[in-house]
Amino acid sequence: MKLRFHDPEEFIAELRQAPPNLEPLLRLTVRRRLDPATGVIHHLSVVASYLRRFSGAPEPLAVVVILEAYQGEDWGDGFEGSRRTRQRLEALLNRLRTITTELGLECRAGVYEPAANPEKA
């Protein structure tokens, strides 16, 4: 199961209230998706994820908690909009790294994603 956020503030509140308890680790990366219409523009998102075991159900439930926060378009060097997008992206990455350190967690690259078919994983 996964719990997905798109708003960094909501994700940060969840991270502080219910931090990872399967391993003290936050995965953090940048997702770059090429715009299929232009073939030139990249859409940039900050993706963070961690593993949390929730109790309270009949059996404990392992959950991947995910943030995918869209930061904007990157048209390449020389474009003011691209520079602002990259600044927003770096600011969010730095904020998440700082919070990770405050919580005593390790920060590594990558993203946790649930298996497409858990029975075959």
Image (cartoon, rainbow, N blue to C red):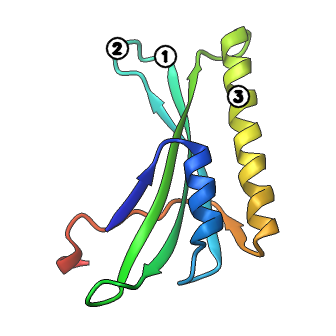
Q: Quadrant of residue 61?
A: bottom left
Label 2: few (<14), some (14–19) or many (≥20) C-alpha neighbours in 10 Å: few
Label 1: few (<14), some (14–19) or many (≥20) C-alpha neighbours in 10 Å: few
Q: Depth check: 12 or 109 in front?
A: 12
Do residues under tags 1 and 3 come within 8 Å of each other at their CB atoms?
Answer: no
- Mark 2 against mark 3, which lies toward the viewer? 3
Q: Which amino acid does the dot numbered 1 rest on?
A: Val
Whole-number angstrom distance, CA of label 1 to CA of label 3: 16 Å
Q: Which residue is the site of mark 2?
A: 37
Badge 1 or badge 3: first in the primary sequence: 1
* Number of callouts: 3
Q: On the rendered structure, is 44 left or right of 101?
A: left
Q: Which residue is the site of mark 3?
A: 86
Whole-number angstrom distance, CA of label 2 to CA of label 1: 9 Å
Q: Quadrant of residue 13?
A: bottom right
| Disc ID at residue 59 | none
Q: Which residue is the site of mark 1?
A: 40
